[in-house]
Image: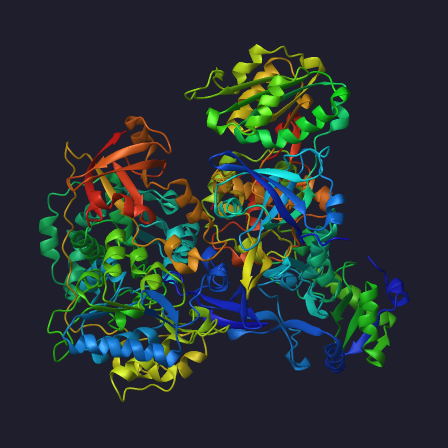
Amino acid sequence: MRTVLTTCPFCGSGCGVYLQAENGKLVGVAPSEHHPISRGKLCMRSWGAHEALLWGERLTIPLIRRNGEQKQALWPEAVGFVATKLASLVAAKKRVGVIASTRDTNEENWLAVRLARDGLRTGSIDFCLRAAYHPLLDGVGQVTGGIPSTATLDDVESAEVVLLVEGDLCTSHPRAAFSVMKCVERGGHLITVGAAKTQMGRLASAHFSTLPGSEGEALNEILSQIVTSSEAKSIVAEKGYEGREEIARSLSGCSVSEQGRAAAKWIAGAGRAVFVLAPTSAPPGDARACASGLASMAALTGHLDREGSGVITLLGRSNLLGAWELSAVPGTRQGGTSDGGAELDAESMLDEVSGLVVIADDPPSVLPDVKHAAEAMSKLEFLVVVDSFVTETARMAHAVLPIAGFAETEGTITSMDGLVQRVRAAADPPGKARHGWEVLADLVAKMSPGRTYRSVAEVFDEIASSVPYYAGMSHASLEQGWGARGRPGRSGSKVRLGEAAASKTVSPEFPMVLALDGVMDWGDDPLVRHAPTLSRDSYARRKMFPAGLVEVCKRDADDLGVRRGWKVKVRSKFGEAVVAVEIRDDLAPGALLVPYAFRGHTAGVLRGASAVAVKVEST
Amino acid sequence: MDSLFLPRIARIVSVRDETPDTKTFALKLRDPGEHQRLHFRPGQFLELSVFGFGEAPFCVASSPTRPETVQTTVRRTGKLTSALHALGVGDEVGLRGPCGNCFDLEAARGKDLLFVAGGIGLPPLRSIIWNVLDERKGYGKVTILYGARTPTDLVYKDELEEWKKRSDVKFLVTVDRSEPGWEGNVGMVPILFDKTELTPDTTLAYVCGPPIMIKFVIQDLLMRGFKEESIISTLERMMQCGVGKCNHCAIGHRYVCRDGPVFNYKQIREMVE
Amino acid sequence: MKNGEDMVQDGAKTIARQDVGKWVAKLMERAEVITPVAGHGGDVMYSRVSSPDDVMFDFANTLLPPKQFVLPQTDPLVRIRRDAGGFKVEPAYDERRRVLFNVRSCDARSISFLTKMHTMDLVDDVFRKRAENVTVVSLTCNIPCPLGFCTCTDSGPFLKDGYDVQLTLLPDRILVETGSEKGVALVAQGGDLMRPAAGTDVDQRKLLEEVARGSMGKETCHFASAMRRVSTGRVEEDLWVRMSDWCVECGGCNLVCPTCYCFSVKDLRDGDGWLRCRTWDSCQYAAFTMEASGHNPRERRKDRMKRRFFHKVSAQYFQRDGMVGCVGCGRCVKVCLGTTDVPAVVGAIRKGAWNG
């Protein structure tokens, strides 16, 4: 039996896990006792990390669509076909784009960027989750000088105070939830903010119940106490922070509860405090303000630069930070683009490009507007899919290049708190599938002759010499120990404090708030969907609510006169939908949450927003 | 000794549509000698394989007095049952079993028997009903009470007519919601109790159906004086192995696939969830 | 407990430290030898050795128990093929000869427990055929591991039975006790590397056991009173509710537990046919008892937690299995992604209180 240490591909925690294989096929996993992040533990998904690759419907042979049907092809033929077609689109000044991934390696993403910028000469490169995370990364970055996380999960465990702007941590980042539990077990104060008082909320010393999208209001409450204190003023003077007075001015009329006062006191008085931020339902502007507000709170209480304190931005995917740092994001390249147009993000690409390369992702299952994404992709002139699993997107493609899954490939990924670790092959890719970096390198070589890479380590070397965070690292140096952290480059300018968040308004006409719960659905992710043990819950839920689902608290359900499974009509200024009701005892009154998996049914009500005021009636 | 997890290959001999989403499959083992040696008793279940889709437990709906085929009635609810519904006469499936305990026919001899079934709860009782009717002299009064949501949802429609016609069986049927053309009773199964004479002291009651229905029926029977040990039901649980190893169907230290699926109400009440 | 004379009578042997490698080499001629080996960065895990030099003697314990060698995480049960004559099925037996070498007492005890579970009532022949070809050489714990509580479960630090071969590290040699015919045969492969044990060897072993037991201090996991409460349903519902908030349902406790064996069965595509495989499962997972209708009798986590501890600690299971469903290895303490390991929960049940 082969036992190989790799890094878990699910959330952004960066847990180490051994994959076990026999005769080239995966059979199971084993935990790593000494790994600095996983420390012998694994979450439910990690324990099933081998499942999808073993049990799932895999892409095993290159495919080219001829006469409407996907036909098997040889590798050179397939790569040649893709390169030729893409080149012809570029030559015809048609728009092309690349969608990279948060579940592939840094090397694959780097080559994706090279393909887009150098090969296709376009700035249209993006990854599907970037739009959801951009406000957080941007908001926190405004204060920290571009660093998404200045603390680690170990800091959470030993903190005296943890402020958590929630998602459902136990589901989205179980490893992080564990650290929060340890903090509370040791007597730390946990403060949670969110529309749902989930498991973390039940362990909290204080839970701020807000309507979805209005998390910023709770933060403002606390911030208003902190921003005018003498301690804050002296910290600002000492560190040279800018913007305190503006925040103080905009929060001057803020009403504060007992809870808000207590929370402010705990935070300001703590020697070690960690501020943890998950994606909220707030619209992008508010989410950015929420993020900068939280980071400002850390700064104003001296916790930005202090040992054992800081901010953590919870990234939902194993290599989200890597994709972000390697600039797999839309941006004008030097010398302009091949089509002369502005760079496109993932959602826009679907509508505006003629040629699209999708790497290790299935956009309709990740992007907020399911229907639009599927429809737009079906109309693409030339769609290329480079992936390991059979997905809806792969079925639509004009060319399919099958690649190895995470446990079958070599490379690196970057955890949410900046640990760069190796991903190693424990098994062989099935059929004719090849390592992703090899396939992308072939494409890059075809489109930018002379640009070749002889090994995956060489790809990483180029990353190390181009992206400051990775300077000095190499596959060889990452082989020993447990990965490496780079030196976070701080921008030279002084830390700026962010603005306070605007508040969400309901009206008599639309008295409740409907919001999407989460920014991605694990049930749709191939690594879960194809895993027999991991997919049971989401599969059962989808079966039970085929016509859609919205979650309300018992009180609201009683007021509406409905029980579990009964239908309600939800109407906003944009549109309406009829969906079934599920009761959640941990939800704030006035809030309706749509689990991300069911977002398709209420798309007309939300119309692209992540939260909207609605009127709800029983049918 | 046979391998515990090894299914035997069976062929579908006939398929009968019972309702829009329910079919009865009659199966015969491909090897005639094996089929001869196959002995299911009423109440037991079999583990049916649709190869490539997996295996699932289904109660045996046929009586050992008619061993030409083994029959099971299956509602389409998911991937495996959909795949099964797509099969036809001559297609092969896997069959493991008999699994579980059975209805105690010895204890029923000479007694009056009351069968109360709701919806898809009739199939497990059909096995013991036909067993009893095929050996009619060994038992006392036989009363069958059956209810379904609508007339369309009634299973074994032809056999219901047979039971109705028999003079040695009291058969009553009801539906929750009527449909055009239905002239029979309308209402939930317990309404049938008042239309028949029950003698709790001499009667064993067999109750199968949706959990809510079983609950109300048993409450009713207890109120009428039935003893807890005289009320017999079958429990359903998520199962994987069907042979008492995987622990999915464990309730306390009892295993529905080994100690059940047939339990009397006293046993059910004493179970530790 | 075997006394010195019994041991000498039963043919207890010793082997010099420097000769163990030669014995292992002989074993490797006829079987796969699987022992704790060094993993990455200080991790220890069971693996098949290609050289006797890879065998570790100095380790606390592995995180994944050796149960994976009698009950693999993905375990083929039936091979399904199809040809012109229809479907063909056959059991997928794994009869590789293996020696699990340097298995700690708790783990050795767990192998006998798992064997009992799979051969009582209806016999799992796939398990049995595999287990029949596995010989367990256990290594006593002269220095008990920090988290273990095997004295509370009568499964260590030294065993009195339930092993094929039991090794005890003495200062300059290793005491070799046999507990079964398989064990006798394995020791015989050592030929004249094995010498009869002297009375002093046996005395040293007894002393080491006393010292080891003594160093474990007072009991850390009181099963008896917890058992009474669990068996009679006298644990407050509210206690289960509060404890379940400190669990994230990772399933780790079940998966690393040497005596847990819950599984699911699914057909894995294999060329043109399928391999029906048993796969590890956890009763803590929400969908473990979910029925096809969508009804789930253990929908709430507190019910799943209650179920787990009923299986581990109840008198009903104790009577059925002859032992409590725990060998005190302490792995669940290390692996728990919350704070609800066996000693913590058993303690809470005893005291009727939970502090997180």
- Quadrant position of residue A366: bottom left
Task: Please tell me which residue is depicted at 19% across the width and 66% down the height of the picture.
Answer: A353
A90 on left or right of A401 = left
In this view, B177 is above or below C198? above
In the rendered image, residue A120, in percent from the top left (x then y), is placed at 21, 77
Which is nearer the eye, C13 or A81?
A: A81
In the rendered image, residue C224, in percent from the top left (x then y), is placed at 67, 42
Which is nearer the eye, A275 or A445?
A: A445
A407 on left or right of A513 = right
Is there any visible trace of residue B243 in the rendered image?
no
- Quadrant position of residue A135: bottom left
In the rendered image, residue B138, in percent from the top left (x then y), is placed at 77, 21
Q: Which quadrant is the C terminus of chain B positioned in?
A: top right
In the rendered image, residue C343, in percent from the top left (x then y), is placed at 58, 50
A507 on left or right of A445 = left
Q: Residue furthest bottom?
A: A450
Which is nearer the eye, B87 or B73?
A: B87
In this view, B198 is above or below A522? above
Is there any visible trace of residue A11 in the rendered image?
yes
In this view, A449 is above or below A300? below
Which is nearer the eye, A426 or A480?
A: A426
